[in-house]
């Protein structure tokens, strides 16, 4: 037994648990629950699917767009930063170039002059720590800066930077510890004095200044921005990829003269977007790395809003659909309930009407024997009143006539009662022959008066089967009534009962009346369609007959042509769907 | 006074005729229209009492046939009361006064016979 929750019970629509149990085993009533389910599903699909597909389309398109935009932004930032770093280095190289061009070797090796140059450089370009002048043998011939006392008598010709600047003319070092174990960068320029003779001016740059170059980029939130050298050693502090002078955990990007922005899922814990660019004329590669998740956060936030909106919309749609469907199906259900009630009333009225129609014939049939009784009794009285002698034979003859007339009357009343008794729906074993003969009994006199010949032909093996006697009577009464109305005097009505298909019995009621025009034949089972409206026809007879046949699980069809009579064929099942086993062994 | 009774119910028509005879009315009867037509050809009747509902030829049709043979004859209809339409047709033909319903009281019938003959 299903558990009943009081709250849900209240919400349950009227039709939810409705079963048309009282309408007979064959009554085709709507399964309202199924209609409701279909309506909800269909309406919900129609309303929600476009919304969902739009949302999913929006999701994929905006994600792609957002990714593209992020990459574009990153490329722009990389480009700007590369320019800044490049400009920083070029600015310092140019300053050194200016110094060496502007100052003679003698002047530059002058301690005071060199200190002045350092001071001027610090004032003008900033970030300069010290200056050193080196001769081609690697000796520092002059130095000015804070570490002067530690640098005497050192030879630098074996240092990488020295070899580079000697060979190329200018040199920008990557970050190295040098003798002082402090990270710094060196820019050096070679100045040729005469063929084979030159000196080198070296400037040590403040890595703090250098690092500060990248600070605004870091603060912009585009990602962890730092420089690496060509070997993948970190040059400027990074937030999440290691300290300065530590190797990066991912491969050094391949050389390209262009700015690269890549998706990288393999070399990081979580997918990242990496922008990088080689900085020209320097050993540096600018790298900006950021987790994709973090970069996509603004997009995701918008998606959350859209998702919440979508969820609320879907919920509202489902609620509305539910409400509308419930209301509609409830409406249909109530209308159907009303229809069933009306139909029952109409059926009842129609049955009463057909009994009313019969009453005229029945009255005639009863009045005749009553008249005989009246006259015979009157005659007996007359004999006693007018005559002296009482002829016994005549008296007995009259009494017998009275008795047989009473018999006639009671046969008629019994038939009527038998007909009226089956107004209620009940399935019982029915002998079709008896039902048809009962019905024809009502038409016997009329047939006699109108010289209508009725033939009833039964196949011998028609079994007794379960059906509703009252409904069968009504069906045949309606059909025979219609046939009598269609036939002129001297007509011919043939009723044939046979087993054509196994498990069914087929009854044909054929008359030779005026028939049904081809244009009307499709409509004759429709309610309120009548060709006899001006003669008091309601247009319900055949529609009710149709309904009754359906209720008994059968089918009714008609063949007719104008002037050639009409043939109604009814096929009834010999077994009820619900009681198949009980009546399984039938001869048909 | 001669009366012809026509009804398809033999028992009825013969008994009514007998009771009329007992009351001094010359009453003949027949159970079919053919027989009735033959009778009026051979003999003049003052009144014909006809059953409305009869096989083949109805009382109303029979009256029309009879009128051709005996235009002066009067008619009273008796019916088991069929439908409303029958009543309308019958009373229009004979007048509601002479359209009687079965069973008929014999004295009433005799009164009607006298009435129709203007006695």
Image (tube, rainbow, N blue to C red):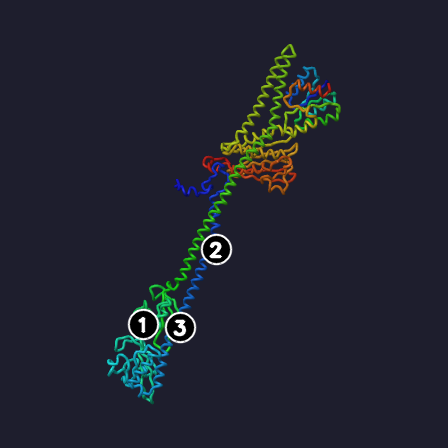
Q: Nearer the viewer, residue A187 or A498?
A: A187
Q: Where is A490 relative to A377, above or below? A: below
Determine the residue located farthest toward the top in the rendered image.
A388
Q: Nearer the viewer, residue A475 or B118?
A: B118
The numbered disc on residue A265 is none
**Which of pointers 3 and 1 lies earlier in the amino acid sequence?**
3
**Which of pointers 2 and 1 lies earlier in the amino acid sequence?**
2
In the image, taking residue B110 as reference, residue A572 lies left or right, namely left
- Crowding near the residue tagged with mark 3, few <14, some 14–19, many ≥20 C-alpha atoms within 10 Å: few
Please tell me whether mark 3 sits on a helix, a strand or a loop: helix
Relative image position of residue B63 (x, y in whole percent) = 71, 26
Which residue is labeled 1 in the image?
Answer: A234
The numbered disc on residue A80 is 3
Which residue is labeled 2 in the image?
Answer: A50
Camera-side mark, 3 or 1: 3
Residue lying at 41% horizontally and 62% vertically, measured from the top left: A299
In the image, taking residue B9 as reference, residue A230 lies left or right, namely left
- Crowding near the residue tagged with mark 1, few <14, some 14–19, many ≥20 C-alpha atoms within 10 Å: many
Q: Nearer the viewer, residue A356 or A317?
A: A317
Residue lying at 62% horizontally and 18% vertically, measured from the top left: A376
**Which of pointers 2 and 3 lies earlier in the amino acid sequence?**
2
Callout count: 3
In the image, taking residue A374 as reference, residue A271 lies left or right, namely left
């Amino acid at each position: 037994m299903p558990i009943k929750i009081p709250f849900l019970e209240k919400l349950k629509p009227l039709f939810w648990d409705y079963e048309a149990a009282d309408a007979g085993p064959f009554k085709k009533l709507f399964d309202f629950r199924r209609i409701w389910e279909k309506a909800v599903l269909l309406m919900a699909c129609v309303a929600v699917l476009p919304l969902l597909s739009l949302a999913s389309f929006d999701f994929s398109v905006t994600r792609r767009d957002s990714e593209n935009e992020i990459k574009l932004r990153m490329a722009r930032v990389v480009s700007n930063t590369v320019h800044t770093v490049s400009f920083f280095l070029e600015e310092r190289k140019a300053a050194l170039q200016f110094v060496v061009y502007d100052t003679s070797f003698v002047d530059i090796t002058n301690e005071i002059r060199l200190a002045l140059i350092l001071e001027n450089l610090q004032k003008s370009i900033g970030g300069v720590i010290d200056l050193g002048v080196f001769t081609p043998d690697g000796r520092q011939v002059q130095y000015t800066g804070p570490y002067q006392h530690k640098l005497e008598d050192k030879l630098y010709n074996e240092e990488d930077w020295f070899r580079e600047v000697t060979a190329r003319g200018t040199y920008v070092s990557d970050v190295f510890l040098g003798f002082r174990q402090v990270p710094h960068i060196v820019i050096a320029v070679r100045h040729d004095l005469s063929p084979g003779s030159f000196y080198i001016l070296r400037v040590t740059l403040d890595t703090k200044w250098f690092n500060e170059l990248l600070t605004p980029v870091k603060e912009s939130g585009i990602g962890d921005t730092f420089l690496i050298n060509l070997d993948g050693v970190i040059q400027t502090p990074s937030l999440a990829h290691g300290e300065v002078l530590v190797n990066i955990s991912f491969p050094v990007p391949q050389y390209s003269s262009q700015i690269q922005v890549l998706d990288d899922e393999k070399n990081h814990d979580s997918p990242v977007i990496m922008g990088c660019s080689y900085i020209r004329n320097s050993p540096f590669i600018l790298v900006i790395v950021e987790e994709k998740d973090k970069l996509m956060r603004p997009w995701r936030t918008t998606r959350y809003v859209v998702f919440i909106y979508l969820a609320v919309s879907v919920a509202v749609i489902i609620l509305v659909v539910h409400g509308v469907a419930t209301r509609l199906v409830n409406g249909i259900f109530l209308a159907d309930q009303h229809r069933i009630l009306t139909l029952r009333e109409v059926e009842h009225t129609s049955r009463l009407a057909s009994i009313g129609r019969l009453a005229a014939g029945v009255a005639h049939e009863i009045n005749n024997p009553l008249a005989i009784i009246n006259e015979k009794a009157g005659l007996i009285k007359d004999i006693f009143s007018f005559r002296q002698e009482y002829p016994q034979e005549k008296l007995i003859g009259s009494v017998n006539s009275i008795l047989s007339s009473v018999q006639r009357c009671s046969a008629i009343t019994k038939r009527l009662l038998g007909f009226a008794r089956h107004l209620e729906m009940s399935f019982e074993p029915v002998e079709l022959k008896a039902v048809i003969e009962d019905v024809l009994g009502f038409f016997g006199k009329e047939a006699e008066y109108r010289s209508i010949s009725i033939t009833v032909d039964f196949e011998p093996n028609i079994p007794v089967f379960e059906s509703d006697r009252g409904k069968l009577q009504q069906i045949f009464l309606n059909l025979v009534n219609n046939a009598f109305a269609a036939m002129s005097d001297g007509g011919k009505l043939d009723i044939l009962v046979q087993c054509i298909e196994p498990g069914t019995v087929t009854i044909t009621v054929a008359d030779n009346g005026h028939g049904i025009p081809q244009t009307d034949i499709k409509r004759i089972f429709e309610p309120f369609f009548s060709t006899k409206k001006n003669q008091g026809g309601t247009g319900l007879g055949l529609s009710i007959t149709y309904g009754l046949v359906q209720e008994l699980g059968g089918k009714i069809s008609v063949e007719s042509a104008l002037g050639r009579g009409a043939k109604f064929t009814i096929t009834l099942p010999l077994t009820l769907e619900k009681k198949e086993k009980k009546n399984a062994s039938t001869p048909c | 006074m001669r009366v012809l009774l026509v009804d398809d119910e033999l028992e009825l028509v013969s008994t009514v005729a007998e009771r009329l005879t007992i009351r001094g009315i010359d009453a003949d009867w027949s159970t079919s229209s053919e027989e009735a037509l033959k009778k009026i050809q051979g003999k003049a009747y003052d009144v014909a009492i006809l059953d409305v509902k009869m096989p083949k030829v109805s009382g109303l049709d029979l009256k029309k046939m009879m009128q051709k043979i005996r235009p002066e004859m009067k008619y009273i209809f008796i019916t088991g009361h069929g439908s409303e339409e029958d009543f309308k047709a019958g009373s229009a033909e004979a007048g509601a006064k002479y359209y009687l319903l079965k069973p008929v009281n014999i004295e009433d019938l005799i009164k009607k016979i006298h009435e129709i003959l203007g006695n």
